[in-house]
Amino acid sequence: MKVSVVMPVYNERPTFQEALRRVQAVELDKEIIIVDDCSTDGTREMVQALEGTCDTIRVFLHDKNQGKGAALRTGFRHVRGDIVIIQDADLEYDPQEYHKLIAPILDGRADVVYGSRFLGGPHRVLLYWHYVGNRILTAFSNMFTNINLSDMETCYKVFRASLLPHFTVRSNRFGVEPELTAKFAKLKCRIYEVPISYSGRDYSEGKKINWKDGIAVFYWILYFNLKKDLH
């Protein structure tokens, strides 16, 4: 099966090239769909320079900053593969774990796989209250989806591309995480979790999600679970 790696990018100049190199190094039949969300720190120029340089890389540019959800919406429209992997352009997640992430799909057990940072993989010790917030948001999401995820907010959401015609991403920002979870649950997908490593960064290193985004996630959990909204 061909893997489509969808990489939303916004102001990741220090890490983007290394993140891309790590994705390219993974030995899989894959395409890499990069969506720059109107970066202003020089990342956009890096992304533009990739156009036409490699058959496996496709580049899309937003004219204004809209958020991670909007970038994923653009990327999903251009998927040509059989399995979709969401990959941030920082260095918090390790692409070498793609093989174990797609394994439950390849062997027919799963439609969706989440890479969980809380199932025992090695991780950088950092930001206690961010950890607590993630667990609270996951528990709140689980109450409405009635699935027992350990890490709803993980970047590594992997799913069969055949699911794409059955839902539309509405969120522009970080509400996309509970939105995708709610929609996978409504579609009765077989969801698996696998443990992953996590090299978290702090705000001085470019982390973007903040407490305001965390508060907004409570709203999006309610909205996407209580509203009949797939398309």
Image: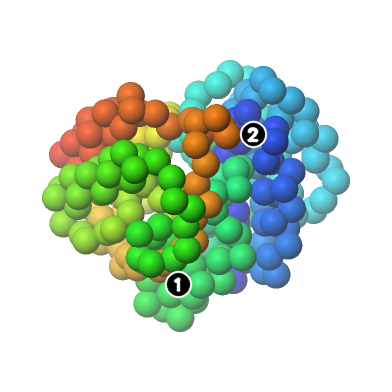
Residue 215 visible in the picture? yes
Give residue 146's position: percent from left, percent from top: 16, 56
**What x and y, as percent, mark residue 174?**
40, 34
Q: Secondary structure at mark 1?
A: helix
Q: Which residue is mark 2?
A: 12
Left or right: where 36 falls relative to 101: right
Q: Name the residue nearer the viewer: 21 or 165.
A: 21
Q: For mark 2, give the secondary structure.
A: loop
Residues at marks 2 and 1, CA–CA distance in whole angstroms: 30 Å
**79 is higher (above) or lower (below) than 223:** below
State left or right for residue 93 relative to residue 23: left
Identified at 68% across, 65% down, the residue is 26
Q: Is residue 37 left or right of residue 186?
A: right
Give yes or no for contact between labels 2 and 1 (Cβ–Cβ under 8 Å): no
**Residue 4, placed above or below residue 99:** above
Q: Amino acid at mark 2?
A: Glu
Q: Nearer the viewer, residue 228 or 95?
A: 95
How many other residues sit within 10 Å of disc 1, few (<14), some (14-19) or many (≥20)?
A: many
Q: Nearer the viewer, residue 163 or 201?
A: 201
| Residue under the point 38% across and 71% down | 110
Q: Quadrant of the N terminus?
A: bottom right
Across and down, in percent, residue 22 comes to 69, 56
Q: Earlier in the sequence, mark 2 or mark 1?
A: 2
* Quadrant housing residue 112: bottom left
Q: Quadrant of residue 116?
A: bottom left
> In the image, what residue occupies the spot 39% across and 29% down?
210
Residue 72's tag is none
Q: Return the residue at label 1.
A: 105
* Amino acid type at image mark 1: Ile
In the rendered image, the quadrant that contains the C terminus is: top left
